[in-house]
Image (cartoon, helix red, strand yellow):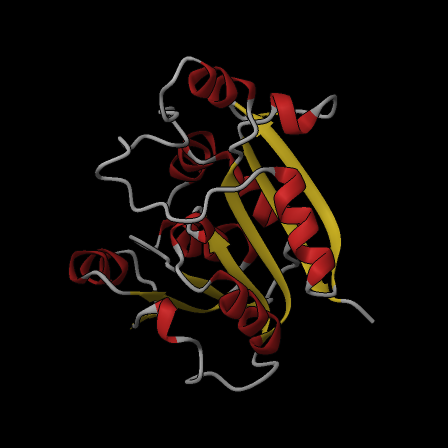
Amino acid sequence: MSAHDSIELAAARPDFAAIAAWIPQGASVLDLGCGDGNLLRYLKETRSVRGYGVEIRDENIVACIKNGVNVIQGDLDSGLSGFESNAFDYVLLSQTLQATRHTEALVQEMLRVGREAIVSFPNFGHWKARLQILRGNMPVSDELPYQWYDTPNVHLCTLHDFEDFCADLNMEILDRRVMTDGNEVKMLPNLRGSMAVYRFKRAA
């Protein structure tokens, strides 16, 4: 991947740059639901990470291999029993949290397998989503591009929902970045932010 390619990826997926900013050089990483492997490839190029992706779809497995990414075919809803405890520095779940069926169990497994976890997800509390609901429709946006009848998203949440979830599971939020159109949102983030990225670990 050239420097130009890295810049283009970061522009297309601003959560990539946010995730990379939290990962030190040479860290070990497990990327769950890694898709075409672009995040791991980006992290290899920008942070020299070591690690694997987990992906279920055949076409994405092929894309990962073309991207030079180590990938294991597996279903996240079946758990992470194939990985030893504390095997990785970071476990990532990028734009996949809302599509998992057993979210609580998976997040707990992420913190068994990794020292820290990083997730990114679309914020269902964003003002445009709220406005569409007030108008009587399920939200459709760049972050939530599906219609109600064909969406893979089964567990949509707001920033407040996710933070309550972390507190209930005794997880400590270490950092958070909220964005809209690639720009960081600090004022009224649950209303004005369309996407969120969180870094967290097991509370002491």
Quarter of the picture containing the C terminus is: bottom right
**Residue in front for this viewpoint, 31 or 97:** 97
Percent from the top left, x then y, of residue 107? 55, 65
Q: Residue at x 47, y 23 (%)?
A: 129
Which picture quadrant has residue 186?
A: top right
Q: Residue at x 69, y 50 (%)?
A: 164
**Residue 105 appears left or right of 21:** left
**Residue 183 appears left or right of 167:** left
Percent from the top left, x then y, of residue 139? 39, 25
Q: How many marks?
A: 0
**Residue 34 appears left or right of 113:** left
Which picture quadrant has residue 150?
A: top left
Q: Is residue 135 above or below residue 87?
A: above
Q: Residue at x 18, y 60 (%)?
A: 62
Percent from the top left, x then y, of residue 102? 44, 64
Percent from the top left, x then y, of residue 63? 22, 55
Q: Is residue 62 above or below residue 95?
A: below
**Residue in front for this viewpoint, 168 or 46:** 168
Q: Is residue 57 above or below residue 108?
A: above
**Residue 151 appears left or right of 129:** left
Q: Is residue 23 above or below residue 102?
A: above
